[in-house]
Amino acid sequence: MITVNFTGAARKSFQTDSLTITQNVSTISELITYLISQKPENTPGFDGKNLLIAVNGVDSSALDGNNTHLQSDDIVNIIPIIHGGANTHTIFTINNHQVGLFEINKSNANKEYLLSLRKKFPKLNLQAISSKFILDKDHAKKIITISINHKLNDQLLSDKIETDLLLRFSNTTQINDAIQNVGLSKSKNFILIAIGSKSNLTKLHETIYGDLNTLFKNNNSNFLKKYFEISTQTMNSIESKTPLVDLLVEKASILI
């Protein structure tokens, strides 16, 4: 007898949190084939691909992958892997660091919400930035790259990369000013920046799924130009397809 626990989309596919498998399956591959055959009709598809599978808490990729042998009383957790490009989040890699951006509804824009996520996911670096202060994925990725590189070189603006991110998006070295300007505000959505392993990012996504809004829905270019005092003349002087991003990133990169 094997217990299979589902999360996220897999839970929706099977309309349950877990199943007890009495069928004789000896490997993960056989288990997936069996599960595909048992999926209820008229539920979201389940093709057995793009999954993180843990056996008794151990990632199957650290075992024998889909050839991992299963035994009676094993507990198998099946977690669909999220991919970058979804309209509520995006996932990408910077210098071997997995990074996720999630747009969170303003109803959760409070310190307690962020602290609870940090407590639940201690292996993730989590920071909240007001959505108005991030233009798009390119802007976010370039500034996060600066922070990650400075962390690798032990040159952060503060002790923690979370604080470094806050300071660079706000273009200041004053922590209190950064918190007040680009931190959490009850009247605004925020973008949750998460840095860590793919498995933890997936689990985070499953936890906050109901709190998500469309990522980068609004065009914040006029606000950012006004806030950071970037003139049209300055914009026109930059030979680039993304002059505003380049100027914002330059401001963030020269902070010391």
Image (cartoon, rainbow, N blue to C red):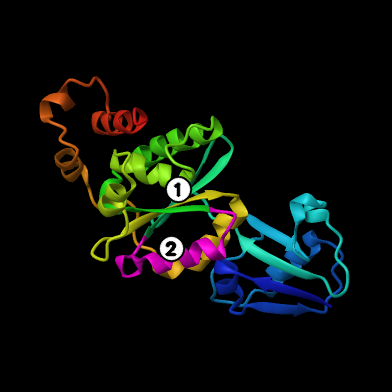
Residue 85 visible somewhere in the drawing: yes
Q: Quadrant of residue 169?
A: top left
The answer to whether residue 70 is above or below residue 157 is below
Q: Quadrant of residue 15?
A: bottom right
Does dot 2 land on a helix, a strand or a loop? helix
Does dot 1 land on a helix, a strand or a loop? helix
Question: x and y percent of residue 241 in the render?
Answer: 27, 27
> Residue at label 2?
114
Q: Is residue 1 left or right of residue 4?
A: right
Q: Residue at x 35, y 39 (%)?
A: 168
Q: Residue at x 65, y 74 (%)?
A: 39
- The kind of residue on which mark 1 rests is Glu
- The kind of residue on which mark 2 rests is Leu
Q: What's the mark number on residue 221?
A: none
Q: Is residue 237 left or right of residue 17?
A: left
Return the residue nearer the eye: 82 or 183.
183
